[in-house]
């Protein structure tokens, strides 16, 4: 599947991934995704899983409450979702893109910033680990 080509799709993807990557509380609050958002989430997940070869069972384990595992393919899957959403470029987390829709989590997200790793995949992973540790109750991946 090709990368997002239109600005509107990229904006929708950014909003979706930002929301889904850090707010499991949506489900807890019984807010359902509309069909378009669910389809976008499916597309991002399929694209990034296909691109990285991640075992989707690892993503599902994290969503069931497990800690992020230091699996190389999972690290690159996380990087892919962050880049697709415009949350990360060239190994640097875009704080403004992350914080805009998540102001209620701003202190934790600001404190995490960009957690440097051995490469861009590891940087994305370490940053997500920080987010997960800061707000485990609301954290999940798409």
Image (cartoon, rainbow, N blue to C red):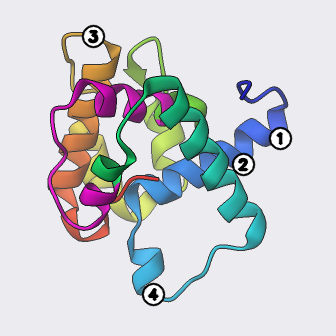
The residue that mark 1 highlights is: 8
Please determine whether, in this image, residue 136 is positioned above or below residue 108: below
Residue that badge 4 annotates: 29
Q: CA distance from mark 4 to mark 2?
A: 22 Å
Rounded to the nearest angstrom, the CA distance separating label 3 from label 2 is 27 Å
Which residue shows up at 31% across the image and 34% down it?
74
- Asked if disc 2 and disc 1 are in contact, CB closer than 8 Å, the reply is yes
Marked residue nearer the N-terminal end (4 or 2):
2
Q: Which mark is residue 12?
A: 2
Dot 3 or dot 1: first in sequence order is: 1
Check disc 1: other Cα within 10 Å, few if <14, some if 14-19, many if 20+.
few
Q: Are marks 3 and 1 in contact (CB under 8 Å)?
A: no
Tell me where the magenta segment starts and ends, as one range: 60-81
Question: Is residue 113 among what the camera can see?
Answer: no
Crowding near pointer 2: few (<14 within 10 Å), some, many (20+)?
some
Q: Secondary structure at mark 2?
A: helix
Q: Secondary structure at mark 4?
A: loop
Observer-nearest residue: 18 or 104?
A: 18
x and y percent of residue 105 in the render?
Answer: 34, 60
**Disc number lying in front (3 or 1):** 3
Up/down of 15 relative to 23, above or below: above
Q: Quadrant of residue 119?
A: top left
């Amino acid at each position: 599947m090709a990368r997002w080509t239109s600005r509107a799709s990229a904006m929708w993807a950014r909003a979706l991934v930002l929301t889904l990557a850090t707010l499991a509380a949506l489900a807890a609050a019984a807010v359902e995704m509309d069909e378009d958002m669910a389809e976008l989430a499916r597309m991002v997940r399929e694209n990034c899983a296909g691109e990285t070869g991640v075992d989707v069972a690892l993503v599902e384990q994290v969503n069931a409450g497990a800690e992020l595992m230091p699996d190389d393919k999972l690290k690159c899957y996380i990087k892919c979702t962050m880049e697709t959403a415009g949350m990360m470029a060239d190994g640097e987390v875009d704080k403004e893109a992350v914080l805009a829709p998540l102001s209620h989590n701003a202190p934790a997200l600001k404190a995490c910033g960009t957690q440097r790793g051995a490469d861009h995949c590891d940087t994305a992973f370490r940053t997500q680990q920080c987010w997960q540790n800061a707000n485990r109750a609301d954290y999940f991946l798409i």
